[in-house]
Amino acid sequence: MTLSVLHVGLESLAVRVGGLNTYCTNLVEAQRANGINAVSTWVGGVEPYSEALSEGSLWRRNCEVARVVRNTKVDLIDVHFAPHALVAVASGALRHRPMVVHFQGPWAAESRWTGGSRLGSLVKRQIERFVLRRAESIVVLSYAFAEVVITNYGVRPERVRVVPPGVHLHTSTSQADARQRLALRPDTHLVVAVRRLVARMGLDVLIRAMVHVPTAELVILGEGPERSALATLIESLQLADRVHLMGLVSEAERNDWLSAASLTVVPTMAHEGFGLVVLESLAAGTPVVVSDVGGLVEVAEMSSFVASFAAGDVGELAEQILLGLHQQLADPETIRQSINGLSWPTVAAYFVQHYQELLTRVEEPRGVVVLDHTARLSGGELAMARTAEVLVSAGRFTPHFVLFENGPFERELRSRGITYEVLPMSERTQSRRRENIWGGFMISLWDSVTFALRLAHLLRQRGTLLVHTNSLKAFVLGTVASLGQSWRLVAHVRDLWSPPYLSAPTARGLRALLAIRTDAVIANSHVTAQAASPDARVIHSPVDSSFFAVPAPTMSPELRIGVVGRIAAWKGQDLMLEAASFLADVPFSITFVGGALFDEAGFETQLRKAAEPFGSQVRFLGSVADVPSVMATFDVTVLTSRSPEPFGNVVTEAMAAGRVVVVPRQGGVLDFIVDEDNGLFYEPNVASSLANVLRRVSSGEIDRNALGNRARATAARYGAPQIATLVESLYESVME
């Protein structure tokens, strides 16, 4: 049976060429090409699959939409402009059919940017909120707008889907042909901006930047209320001979301008959900410069041919334009290939699957709010992200992260398809170290209580059913926020609640807090569980699947030793250098992978100085993005931690890569390392013991390949799907 969908749009492309209208039209046509019976209704519809709405008032259009929705026999309604669906939703015209709403921008907030009244904006926001909160699924183009619909409109996170738009990849023309049609000189340095002429688009910033780019011409395509002000600015800066406001043009001419351009610029100041024109420019083979606003940040991550600048910074924008105009870039086809996965057929295929899920599911996924105080790329954060990705795919629980700071972990979550928001914590609370956690609480008690109250308010707004705390600070603040609340609370203990990691009084206080409110406890190893709670369920951290693809090590005349992890005194990198002093008879090299945080910079300086006598035998790579590729250059990976590791993520990663792992006989590694079977033990903090083990590996006494193969087999038990199944089972038991 053919799936049928009614799309409720804003306007036909025959009325106005704009981002929302272009997206909606392209999606409808791509779905029709994919076998879906997709029809539409929008203002001025002249397409054979569309029913036209009048250009009258919003109320009149609402009534017409309600009539079309009620009378059109389709399986599902897909709304692209929420205000058009107000009457249809309120009057019951949907007739119990699922509704998807595409959110492409805050209508109310945008109206304020264009001079609308505060009252008018408030009314518009309530209209949007009414429709959005009644949809079975909200589709946004970026995680920036996912956060907007969740935080500003109260949409439940588990209903939000982030789906980047598509683009036509095979309809571009060459730059030379486009310039010939537009009567441009072949050698022109041409900058193009395709934007509505409204204040939030930042076109005044772009025009001012052109003062510093004297060899280039700027063409602005679009119309809007700021035209007069922009024209005046151009005249005042004496740029009329090379900055041109072209107004609205046909879609064909617009595409020619994108192909003819040397560079396109998207200088938006606010409310940019994605920037479809960025993809259109790349599809035309033209590089792009974008501001660091909203979804544009995410677009810049998708292609190396997108550069960014700080929104509103005229000088930085001028620098990026000059760089883009004069550097040697790849050919247009290479630029197009950078977004090869974002075709409209691919997007249409996703929606076929998504619509079918909405129509056939028995129950809606349950939301889980994951709390984490940090946005750094630490082991616990990466482990939870891997688990959450599998949970999202399984469809029974949908994790949504609340982070207490901004940082690189946001990008990691985006790459794995996980929604998140940031609730900023005060610097005093964020910087408090575990060593003085209770003293710190007395000093900044007001900060902590205030934050816990804010967190409790946020969790109530999200309609939270289950909270999962993923770090020590998140546990403390999340537990306080949960006092007197009805949601379930799961505490994930990833640290050793015992000396020397925590003082005895601090550990007792944490265990007391655990007993007061927590419904379930997850520990990442048995040693962690023993220190935290006798009722803790041990669920180990998952291994990133990319490590299993690392090839077996090749033969080398020297023993290539890798030490991976953040440089810190308790991580014991200096122990590796002490052991190296016992290996004068062994050919070896040591590579340290990882950097130091600010408060450990002194230790890193000492470590580098201690490494100087070894010369080129020791190198420091700092933080690296592709750890599996670096690990492929090692024969053996050494864990040097002075204190017991709660689990040892880097150990299971090295095992997954088939490397010989040498670890101290303590901590969480005791859960999965069997000496001389899948790894090798040395006595903790004893450099001579570590050196003796490494000498045995170098001499050939240890069969490296056999041990590495058994290590890889052990690590396979800790894949993200297996770990996520255990977490899902715990969630189910807590929710019963």
Image: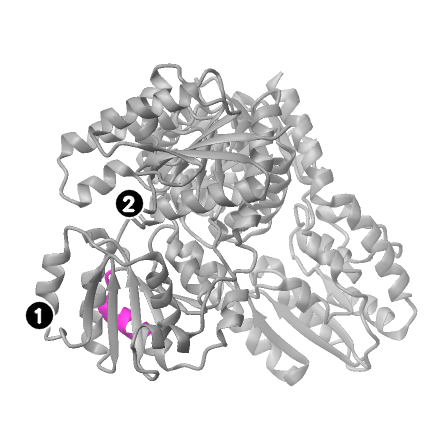
Real-space CA distance between mark 1 and mark 2, rounded to the nearest whole angstrom = 31 Å
The residue under label 1 is which amino acid type?
Glu
Q: Residue at x 70, y 59 (%)?
A: 639
Q: Residue at x 52, y 45 (%)?
A: 30
Q: Secondary structure at mark 1?
A: helix
Within the magenta stretch, is there residue 510? no
The residue under label 2 is which amino acid type?
Val
Question: Does 415 sit left or right of 49 as displayed?
Answer: right
Contact? badges 1 and 2 (CB < 8 Å): no
Q: Residue at x 38, y 48 (%)?
A: 22
- Scheme of colours in the image: one colour
How many residues crowd around disc 1 within 10 Å: few (fewer than 14), some, or many (20 or more)? few
Q: Which mark is residue 235?
A: 1
Residue 332 spot, x, y in % from top left: 48, 73
Q: Residue at x 18, y 41 (%)?
A: 112
Provide the residue span drawn in magenta: 312-320
Please tell me which residue lies in front, 225 or 385. 225
The quadrant the N terminus occupies is top right
Q: Which mark is residue 726?
A: none
Please tell me which residue lies in front, 64 or 313. 64
Q: Against 493, is 652 above or below? A: below
Q: Secondary structure at mark 2?
A: loop
Label count reads 2
Q: Which residue is mark 2?
A: 15
Majority secondary structure of magenta residues: helix
